[in-house]
Image (tube, helix red, strand yellow):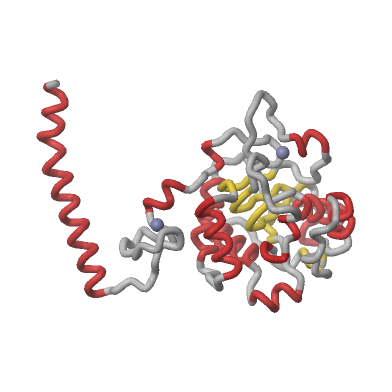
Amino acid sequence: MTKISLNEKTSKPNNKFKKFFVNLWEMFCKLFFPSKIKCVCCGRDLVKPADIEFCEHCKQKLPYLKNYKICKVCGTDISGMSDFCISCKSSKREFVESRSVFIYKDNVKKLILNLKFSNKPYLAETLGAEMAELFKTLNWKIDVVIPVPLSAKRLKWRGYNQAELLTKSFCKYTNLTLNTDVLEKINDTSQQAKLNYSERQTNLLKSFKVKDKQSIKDKTVLLIDDIVTTCATANVCSKVLKNAGAKTVYVLSVARTSVKIPQEKGLDSNKKLI
Ligand SMILES: [Zn+2]
Ligand SMILES: [Zn+2]
C-alpha cells in the first residue's frame, strides 16, 4: 500500500509534466508545420518526428510474426506440436529459410496495398526498416541481397518495383550489398490464377532469368519480396538462382499469408496483388 502511494506521489507529477510538454510540442508542430501526412492505418495526423507512415498506436497493434509460433522453414504461423507447416512437410523448398515481419492481415494488408496500388512508394522506407529489425534477430550470413523482379509490363504499369524499394531501404539499415541487376522476369505471369501449384511452378520457372551469373557465383543470396503467399515465387526464384551458381538462398518478406486464414484462390498470382 505504502509503495503504491509513494510511486503515485513521485511519478504522477512527472507524467503530468511530460504530457503537458508533449501536448505543447504537438500544438506547436500543428501550428507551424501543418501535417499533410496521415497515418496510413487510422488516418490520424502524424506530428511527432518519430512517426513515419503509421502512428505508434497502430504500430503496436500490427500482427508481428515474432509473437507467434512459426514454421521453421517458410515462416508462416502454425499451431500444434510440429515445427513445420503442412506444405513444408510435403513439398521441397529450394530456399533454406523464409521469414516475414508480419502476418498478411488487417492493417498490414492496408499498408501493402497502399504501397502497391495507391502510389505510395515511400511506405517501403518504413517497411524496409521493419525487415532490417527482424533480420538482426536471425543468424543469416548474407553475401548479396536481390529483390524479386517485376515483368517489364507490370513495371511500366506501376512505375516502380515495390520489392526493389524495400530492398534498397533494407540494405540502407543493414549495410548489406544490394544488386538489382541479377534476376529478371521475362514473362508476365499475372494470368495464372486458374493453374494448379505445379503448373504454376512450371510456368514461373520459364519466367525468371539470371542476367548476371558472376555476381552470385558461390554466394549466399537473400531474396526480398513484399509478400509471400504459397511460396511458389520464392521457390522458383531460389531454384533459378541456384541453377545459375548461387550457393544458398534465404527469403525475407514484409508479410506472410497465414495458413490459418482462408485466402483468395490464386492469391499468389492474383492480378491485383502482384
Ligand atoms: Zn494510426
Ligand atoms: Zn512451412
Give me the residue at 79% from left, 55% from top: 237
Which is nearer the eye, 58 or 99?
A: 58
For the N terminus, the image quarter is top left
Find residue 216 and report its horizontal and vertical position in percent: 77, 57
115 vs 238, left or right, is left
Give me the residue at 59% from left, 33% from top: 69
Find residue 266 and report its horizontal and vertical position in percent: 75, 55
Dividing the image into four equal quarters, which quarter contains ligand 2? Answer: top right
Find residue 156 and report its horizontal and vertical position in percent: 70, 78
Picture layout, residue 226 above or below residue 2 = below
Residue 163 in view (yes/no):
yes
Give me the residue at 31% from left, 61% from top: 48
Give me the residue at 44% from left, 46% from top: 61
Find residue 15 and report its horizontal and vertical position in percent: 17, 45
For the C terminus, the image quarter is bottom right
Which is nearer the eye, 81 or 22?
A: 81
151 vs 163, left or right, is right
Which is nearer the eye, 266 or 153?
A: 266
Instruction: Kindly indicate the quadrant of the structure image that contains residue 138.
Output: top right
Residue 218 in view (yes/no):
no
118 vs 260, left or right, is left
Picture layout, residue 205 above or below residue 260 = below
Q: Residue furthest top?
A: 1
Picture layout, residue 70 above or below residue 48 = above
Instruction: Kindly indicate the quadrant of the structure image that contains residue 148.
Output: bottom right
